[in-house]
Image (cartoon, grey):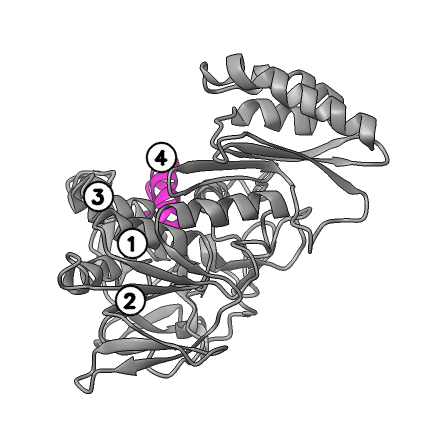
Amino acid sequence: MEHIVIIGNGISGVTLARHIRKLSDKKITIVSAETEYFFSRTALMYVYMGHMKFEHTQPYENWFWKKNRIDLKQGYVKHVDTNSKALHFSNGETMSYDKLVIATGSKPNKFGWPGQDLDGVMGMYHKQDLENLEKHAPNKEVCKRAVIVGGGLIGIELAEMLNSRSIPVTFLVRESSFWNGVLPEGESAMINRHIRNHHIDLRLSTNLKEIKSDGNGKVKSVVIEETGEEIPCDVVGLTAGVSPNIDFLKDSNIETGRGVKVNRFLETNILDVYAIGDCAEQHEAIGNRRPIEAVWYTGRMMGEALAQTLCGNRIQYNPGHWFNSAKFMDIEYQTYGWVFSERSKKENEAHFHWIHKDDTKCITVAYDKNTNEFLGINTFGIRMRHETFDKWLTEKRDVDYVINHLVEANFDPEFYGRFEKEILTAYNNQLQTA
């Protein structure tokens, strides 16, 4: 019987295993060094905030794996020998495979800061990070201040988590405005204000120089590069992005760049070796998409597509129109299609921006200024329907159509009674002054 081994038990690997089982009787083994059972990584913050227990983050009961004949192996893979089709574990064990899938996800970036390995310094990605946070920041008496380094989505989640336990937070962001490599100016500025309204000490255009030790291996403070200021703290959160978790492949002959290089069928340069999820790097461009996408739903889609291929129906990975969602404290964010920041905007891209007077709701619509074709929308504090925008992007609707039909995309029945006319008026006013 063919043996498929999947390294990594995140959303990609588990989706793949489930779909292979639906389609076949192949022998399936999932290998993980992190936790015995699959859990929802995005839910870790809610465990710390007291909304749920860790066991609630596991979508499947413990009996599910045995019942579905999916073997779980805990262990750290040290080396992959593709010639003999064998995995070598750190404890000396080996495991053979017929087909191998690398689904090892991401690891937090570290930039070689002095003191980055001290006790109390952590990312916010793994279950071990959650345990570390509970140990070093159980309350404001034990943790008198936390410093977060890096201004992405994980950074803002960690700030919200600490804020929920009234722990003072200093947030170091090297950019001049929060997440302005991704968000247009108006949205980024609104999020700056929102973070500060939550009494978080946001420091823009600020870099970390070093993390200082208390002499016993624990963090006691950080030093700011620009000013030399020393900020006493008990926890440092390193949230300056993530990178593919592929160090264990460096002595194998599997081709890597930043991630494991794959084609549209998620195949590597080695026969019978594949990669999916955050660690996979597309070497053939898919529209405007980045070669590596550390996004939950694309990982799931890769797992579904590869299951078909491994079970005899070879199909390309096709993620469709870009979309994503996140939360900035209590402002929900959704994006459909492409809305680029000022620094990455294309020449033909124009924006219509509307912001509500309460400073917690806004939309930005991107369109082609030559053809008026709708390119994408960002919404903050407003829920919109994915299916509607997906359809309009496929139909290549123009921006006038989208603005005039926004009510059809409305996911919040209370919302449009109040703001639809206001958005339309603002749009018409902008057209007249343009």
- Residue 381 shown left or right of residue 2 in the figure: right
Tell me where residue 108 appears, x and y as whole percent: 39, 65
Q: Nearer the viewer, mark 3 or mark 4?
A: 3
In percent of the image, x 45 and y 76: which residue is there? 111
Disc 2 + disc 1, Cβ < 8 Å: yes
Q: Position of residue 410 (x, y in %)?
A: 52, 19
Considering only vertical position in the picture, is 119 above or below 395?
below
* The label number, if any, that marks residue 29 in the structure image: 1
Q: CA distance from mark 3 to mark 4?
A: 13 Å
Q: Residue at x 19, y 61 (%)?
A: 137
The tag on residue 44 is none
Residue closest to the eye, 214 or 375: 214
Expressed as whole percent of the image width and height from the top left, the position of residue 75 reads 24, 66
Amino acid beneath label 4: Lys
Give the structural element (helix, strand or loop) at label 3: helix
Q: Amino acid at mark 1?
A: Thr
Residue at image location 39% in from the left, 73% down from the top = 248
Q: Indicate which disc, 4 or 2, sits on the residue closer to the N terminus.
A: 4
> Which residue is labeled 2 in the image?
95
Residue 22 marker: 4
Amino acid identity at mark 2: Met
Would you say residue 329 sits in the magenta stretch? no
Of mark 3 and mark 2, the one earlier in the sequence is 3
The residue under label 3 is 65
Tag 1–tag 3 contact (CB < 8 Å):
no
Q: Is residue 12 magenta?
A: yes
Counting residues from the start of the chain, the first of labels 1 and 3 encountered is: 1
The image shows a total of numbered marks equal to 4
Q: Earlier in the sequence, mark 3 or mark 4?
A: 4
Stretch in magenta: 9-27
